[in-house]
């Protein structure tokens, strides 16, 4: 596809989410797909980014069994009642959430083709909030392309 006269288009959107913490998982695929459609971009890349060090982004099959499996998995890897050096600095009780979020990472790229994300049939983009309290999270969704 030829680039338009102005070159590559970049559009940035915010997807605000109210979360409960403690491995609260949100499927953001439908909201992002709506923004992608309104952007008019048909071919390119989509970047998802969540600011903060106690939440992360990944792709999963968004279904109740897997959501429970994820919670149990993270509890085994970084238990809430564990001893974390982070607590020695801040005493805020969320050392486990920082460790968990570092395993997922704050950003994710997904190719765009034909105006759609190139996700698998059972694959969704999700935000996982690991903090020890409810939060308002803001996912930055940036799409660039033609």
Image (spheres, rainbow, N blue to C red):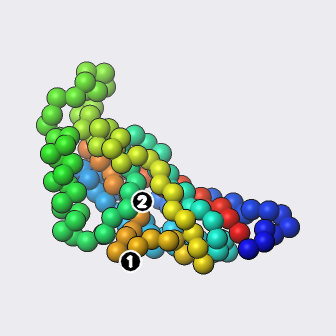
Q: Going by the picture, which residue comes out furthest to the top?
A: 88
* Residue drawn at x 54%, y 75% as measured from the top left: 116
Q: Nearer the viewer, residue 52 or 134?
A: 52
In the displayed structure image, the side of residue 143 where residue 121 appears, left or right: left
Q: Nearer the viewer, residue 78 or 95?
A: 78
* Residue drawn at x 29%, y 38% as measured from the top left: 99
Quadrant (top left/top right/bottom left/bottom right) for the N terminus: bottom right
In the displayed structure image, the side of residue 71 where residue 112 appears, left or right: right
Where residue 62 sits, quadrant-wise, is bottom left
Q: Where's residue 91, x and y in %?
A: 26, 27
Residue located beneath label 1 in the image = 121
* Residue drawn at x 19%, y 43% as measured from the top left: 77
Instruction: Name the secondary structure under disc 1.
Output: loop
Q: Where's residue 28, x and y in %?
A: 43, 66
Q: Where's residue 86, x and y in %?
A: 28, 27
Can residue 131 be seen?
no
- Label annotation for residue 17: 2
Between circles 1 and 2, the one closer to the viewer is 1
Q: CA distance from mark 1 to mark 2?
A: 24 Å
């Amino acid at each position: 596809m030829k680039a338009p006269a102005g070159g590559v288009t970049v559009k940035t959107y915010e997807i605000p989410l109210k979360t409960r913490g403690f491995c609260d998982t949100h499927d953001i695929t439908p909201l992002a797909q709506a923004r992608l459609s309104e952007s008019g971009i048909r071919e390119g890349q989509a970047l998802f980014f969540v600011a903060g060090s106690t939440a992360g982004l990944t792709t999963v099959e968004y279904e109740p069994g897997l959501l429970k499996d994820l919670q149990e998995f993270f509890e085994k890897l970084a238990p809430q009642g564990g001893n974390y050096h982070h607590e020695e600095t801040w005493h805020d009780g969320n050392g486990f959430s920082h460790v968990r979020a570092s395993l997922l990472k704050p950003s994710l790229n997904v190719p765009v083709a034909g105006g759609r994300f190139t996700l698998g049939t059972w694959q969704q983009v999700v935000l996982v909030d690991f903090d020890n309290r409810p939060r308002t999270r803001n996912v930055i969704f940036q799409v660039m392309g033609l």
